[in-house]
Amino acid sequence: MSVFFPPIYSQEEAQKIDEELFTEYLFSVDQLMELAGLSCATAIAKGYRPTVFYPKRPNKQLFQNLTSQCEKMDIPFLSYFPGESSLITDSYNLIVDAFFGFSFKGPVRGDFGMYLSQLIKAGVPICSIDVPSGWDIEKGDPEGIQPESLISLTAPKLCAKLFKGKQHFLGGRFVPPDLAKKYHLNLPPYPGTDCCVELLTQDSVDDDKSKETKDK
């Protein structure tokens, strides 16, 4: 059953919550990455064989370890980005968009602009993680990626109000109750032992309100 959970917090608030998870609640970066990743993997339909495109690799042990683990699990990496959008269309059934995080600001630079343009042209369903790549966290981007699915992490960001896709999930069962109360997150209940919950999209809520108005 889907529940409605309105987007409630800005980029600054998102950064503060993350900082408290690290400093006060003593989560490590790799812990949160694993929990968030599990939420995303659970929300995405089963049955896909992933291929990873990882164009900019930080020189940090954590990311090197994760890359090595993927390679040892025989998960293939693309050595280059397909130059023609038709190659993406013919080769993949779903694109998981995780280029940028919620801290992204400013225009898309370098090759990333080309990557996003090709993804839009390909017409393959896109599932964006937390914030669609290239979007302003509060204002969105009507000309940018328009994902079919969105997986918000911790709580939906303000730009989720502009999400027009079919499915909106929330992953973030790792948020301590005291932190949720402090920032008035009013998190929805997670079913059973699930680490993600499906939310009603803004369009669904607007449609319900329109029907209620007509029925009166």
Image (cartoon, rainbow, N blue to C red):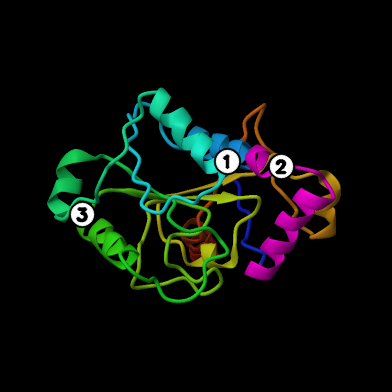
Q: Residue 215 in the image: x percent, y percent?
A: 52, 62
**Pointer 3 local density, CA inside 10 Å: few below 14, some 14–19, many at least 20:** some
Quadrant containing the N terminus in the rendered view: top right
Residue at 56% across / 41% down in the picture? Answer: 61
Q: Is residue 53 left or right of residue 29?
A: left
Q: Which residues are magenta?
A: 10-32
> Mark 2 or 3 closer to N-term?
2
The residue tagged 1 is 62
Up/down of 38 relative to 181, above or below: above
Under mark 3, the amino acid is Ala
Under mark 2, the amino acid is Ser
The residue tagged 3 is 122
For the residues labelled 1 and 2, say whether their Cβ atoms are less than 8 Å apart: no
Q: Nearer the viewer, residue 119 or 70?
A: 70
Q: Residue 180 in the image: x percent, y percent?
A: 79, 52
Which mark identifies residue 28?
A: 2
